Image: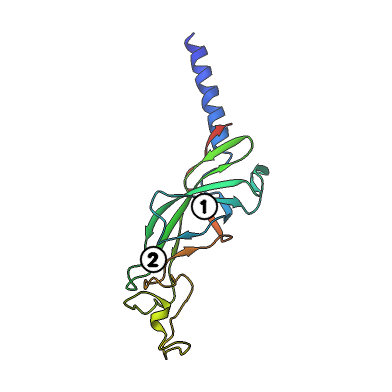
Amino acid sequence: MRILGSLIFLLFTAISALAANDIPKGTKIDVRITTLLNSDSTSPGDTFEARLNRDLVVNGKTVAPEGSIARGRVDTADPSNGGQTAGVLIIRLTEIETKDAIYNFTTNTYTRQGHGRPRPYNRAGSVADTIAGVGHPSNNPPDIGVGTSIGSGSGPAALIPEGTLVTFRTTTAAATENK
C-alpha cells in the first residue's frame, strides 16, 4: 500500500511539473495592451487586459495562440503632481487564458513615466485662461504634449496607450488551471 501511495505521489508530481513547464521561468511574452492605462486615473492593484501579439511557443509546442487574452496588474500608479512631478505607471503580466486553460505566473515589470513639459499652472485650470483676449493667443500658449492632461493644470501623466506592444519575461513557471 505504501508503494502504491508513493507511485501516485510521483505520478501527480510529474504531471504537475509537465503542466508548469508549459510556460517555464524566463519565457518571453509579447502582448498588445487593449485599453489606455493612465497614472492619474489608475490605482495599484487595478487589472488590465492585453492580447498575445504572436503565438506563444515553448519547446516547439504552441501553448497559447496569437490573440489569446492576457491579464496583468498595476503595481504602481503615481499620479502627476500639480505640474511638479511626472506620473509613473508600473505593470506586470499575471496570466494568459486559452480555450483549454488559464496559465498563472509572474513577470518582470514594465515602467512608463510621463514625459514632456507640464502645462503652465493657471488659477482656473483651463486653456481659456491662457488666452489673452478673445481670439488673441498669448505669447505663451499652453503646451499640450504627450501624457499631459488638458485643462487640469497638472504635470504629465504616465500613459500606456491602447495598442502598445510590451514584452514581458516570466519570473516564475506557470501554474495551470484547466477550464
Q: How is the image coloured?
A: rainbow
Q: Which residue is mark 2?
A: 87
In this rendering, is residue 76 above or below 176?
below
Inspect the image, locate mark 2, and give the three-letter code of the amino acid beneath it: Gly
In this rendering, is residue 127 above or below 134?
above
Q: Position of residue 64 (x, y in %)?
A: 63, 43
Name the residue at 44% across, 85% down: 141
- Dot 1: element: strand
Q: Residues within 10 Å of mark 2 (few under 14, many from 20)?
A: many
In this rendering, is residue 14 above or below 163?
above
Name the residue at 56% across, 37% down: 102
Mark count: 2
Which residue ends up furthest to the top in the rendered image?
1
Q: Residues within 10 Å of mark 1 (few under 14, many from 20)?
A: some
Q: Which residue is mark 1?
A: 169
Name the residue at 62% across, 40% down: 98
- Along the line of sight, which residue is nearer the eye, 179 or 139? 139
Q: Position of residue 77 (x, y in %)?
A: 38, 58
Q: Position of residue 120 (x, y in %)?
A: 37, 80
